[in-house]
Image (cartoon, rainbow, N blue to C red):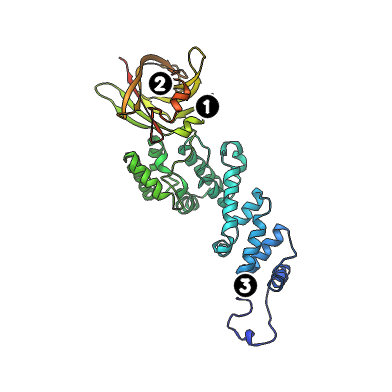
Amino acid sequence: MQLFSNGMRESEQRHVTLRINASEEAALMELLNFMYSNTLSTTSAPALLDVLMAADKFEVASCMRYCSRLLRNMPMTPESALLYLELPSSVLMAEAVQALTDAAKQYLAARYKDISKFIEEVMALPLAGIEAIVSSDELQVASEDAVYDFVLKWSRTHYPKLEERREILGSRLARYIRFPYMTCRKLKKVLTCNDFDHDAASKLVLEALFFKAEAPHRQRILAAEESATLNRRFVERAYKYRPVKVVEFDLPRQQCVVYLDLKREECANLFPSGRVYSQAFHLGGQGFFLSAHCNMDQQSSFHCFGLFLGMQEKGSVSFAVDYEFAARSKPTEEFISKYKGNYTFTGGKAVGYRNLFAIPWTSFMAEDSLYFINGVLHLRAELTIRH
């Protein structure tokens, strides 16, 4: 213990002189008291933090653990969580404090998981708070594009000087943005964004594009390997708008094929009247999206799985589209066409089928359902512009 056995001549003398700041006196007395009695008389969070700092300074690990445990058992607030995350780095590195800082991060991540509800509060948080929030898998955001936009907005507000901002983004925040789940349109913008070092941005975008090009089983392996590390950039969050894979053709006709995968639990959560949307995809310069619903069938007699195709609100352009919905089905696990149609879209309109599989919801979700393969529903939509 550093306090009494630092190898200096004090340890051989009867009188020990400690030089401390006046502000440290109360905490030091508490620390000495703890060393003889294993208890503390103070119970307030600020006073316990002072003792924790003194215990760190004099390397009394048992007291650090004791303070950390007491603080962890107190009700957490945004203010106290930030205090714990902004302790000096020497304290943060200590194993005794790890559980306290983990609890603080989890508290902030849970409190602010829907950033859009607390945007002013979150915009005012310091760096440590932002790191805790954007590193979380549970973040409820429309898409990873929204995380990127938020991080950029926050860093421009708190670090108006470009050099400082680049440093903070490069060394602290970029690692928490999951570039592989951003849309290709947004990734193009990353390449021309001045806030990032150009070489670093190129590397992040390349890695994201390589990940997108991988087969799904390889993506799952990469995500599993990554989930043990700190940045978790290949781990998908629970986006409000589900990621899609898109194959586009210009010739012989303008066409796109869109793949949307939904996990069994995501589908189960749709009951009785929920819906889930895909990220936007583009055909002929126009934005479209898919939406999967749990709804009543046409006669309102039972719940069933519906799939719809919508056009984003933009202008008054009208668009004639042939479309086809398909799903992988057992036993062949090939895509089987479920519905074909054509529709002239105008902005904000949607078209689709209320009962895609022509079965009730209970049969669709049953253990022996033909449509869940290893717990995943694989949907495909093919869109072609009609001339």
Q: Quadrant of the N terminus?
A: bottom right
Label 2 neighbourhood size at 10 Å, few (<14), some (14-19), many (20+)?
many
Furthest residue to the left?
A: 252
Residue 306 position within the rendered picture, expressed as x and y whole percent measured from the top left: 45, 21
Figure quadrant of the C terminus: top left
Q: Quick one: SS at disc 3?
A: loop
| Dot placed on the residue nearer the N-terminal end, 1 or 3 | 3
- Residue 6 drawn above or below residue 250: below
Please, what is the three-letter code of the amino acid marked with disc 3? Phe
Disc 2 marks which amino acid? Phe
Label 2, secondary structure: give it. Answer: loop
> Does the image show residue 197?
no
Q: What residue is disc 1 on? A: 271
**Mark 3 vs 2, N-terminal side:** 3
Q: Residue furthest top?
A: 299
Look at discs 1 and 3 and give the one toward the viewer: 1
Q: Secondary structure at mark 1?
A: loop
Q: Which mark is residue 58?
A: 3
Q: Looking at the image, which residue is at 41% across and 20% down? A: 356
Residue at position x 58%, y 83% from top?
7
Q: CA distance from mark 1 to mark 3?
A: 58 Å
Give the vertical position of 132 relative to 324 (above or below): below
Q: Nearer the viewer, residue 66 or 248?
A: 66
Residue that mark 2 sits on: 357
At label 1, which amino acid type do we have? Phe
Disc 1 packing (10 Å; few <14; some 14–19; many ≥20): some
Residue 352 at least partly seen: yes
Compute the Cα span from label 1 to label 2: 16 Å
Q: Residue at (64%, 84%) from the top-left corner?
A: 10
Instruction: Give whichever of 264, 85 is nearer the camera.
Output: 264
